[in-house]
Image (tube, rainbow, N blue to C red):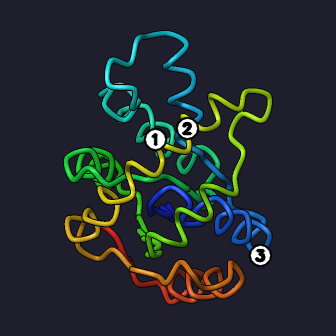
């Protein structure tokens, strides 16, 4: 099974996945950003967003399927995925492979998202790049918030302003209940 934690930049996806992993040690963490970073080293990304590269979407789905099939362990995926077409491609490939997906979306107010983004350092040795990344993240808040209405049916919306411990409890309760929330 896959537990996909979605939400805007700064919503707490990685923090929640880290908390889930501490409570669910057999779970693997698969961060699709790593796939994007590798692709950026190989090919040009004209839009600046590696999600726009079809190969990224294929590789993310293939990697997630491979992890589940090879290791027979749950996979935690912290990734903003708000383009409905891209979500359809990835979740469709997972479904076609017979992989159960629990899809959670962290809802957080714009004000809190901006505070969290401002409090992060993405490239500590390069303040100019750090600010550029912060602007990029903030520029996508409205898009991520609006996308909540276009996410796949079965998406579970969580209050991302709760503590990571509270959120992990909600996710684990939902997953352990056996209901498939997702695509």
Q: Count neighbours of disc 1 (C-alpha within 10 A) and say few if under 14, some if 14 to 19, many if 20 or more.
A: few
Residue 44 vs residue 103, the one in the foreground: 44
Residue lying at 73% horizontally and 63% vertically, measured from the top left: 18
Instruction: Please provide percent x and percent y for residue 26.
Output: 74, 63
Residue position for label 1: 136
Residue 61 vs residue 141, the one in the foreground: 141
Residue position for label 2: 133
Mark sitting earlier along the chain (1/3): 3
Asked if the residue at tag 2 contacts the one at tag 1, i.e. Cβ–Cβ closer than 8 Å, the answer is yes
Residue 44 is labelled as: none
Vertically, is 183 above or below 178? above
In the displayed structure, does residue 127 sit left or right of residue 131? Answer: right
Q: Inspect this view and state whether residue 54 appears.
A: yes
Instruction: Please provide percent x and percent y for residue 105.
Output: 42, 70
Residue 23 is labelled as: 3
Q: Count neighbours of disc 2 (C-alpha within 10 A) and say few if under 14, some if 14 to 19, many if 20 or more.
A: some
Q: Inspect this view and state whether residue 1 appears.
A: no
């Amino acid at each position: 099974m896959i537990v996909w934690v979605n939400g805007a930049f700064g919503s707490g996806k990685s923090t929640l996945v880290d908390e889930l992993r501490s409570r669910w040690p057999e779970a693997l963490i698969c961060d699709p950003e790593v796939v994007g970073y590798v692709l950026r080293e190989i090919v040009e990304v004209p839009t600046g967003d590696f999600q726009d590269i079809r190969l990224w979407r294929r590789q993310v789905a293939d990697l997630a399927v491979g992890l589940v099939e090879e290791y027979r362990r749950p996979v935690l995926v912290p990734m903003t995925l708000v383009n409905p077409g891209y979500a359809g491609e990835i979740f469709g490939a997972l479904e076609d492979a017979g992989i159960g997906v629990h899809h959670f979306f962290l809802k957080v107010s714009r004000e809190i998202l901006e505070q969290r983004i401002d409090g992060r350092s993405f490239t500590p040795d390069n303040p100019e790049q750090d600010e550029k990344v912060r602007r990029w993240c903030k520029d996508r808040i409205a898009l991520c918030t609006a996308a909540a209405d276009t996410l796949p049916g079965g998406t579970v919306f969580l209050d991302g302003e709760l503590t990571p411990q509270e959120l992990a409890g909600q996710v684990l309760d939902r997953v352990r209940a056996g209901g498939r929330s997702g695509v």
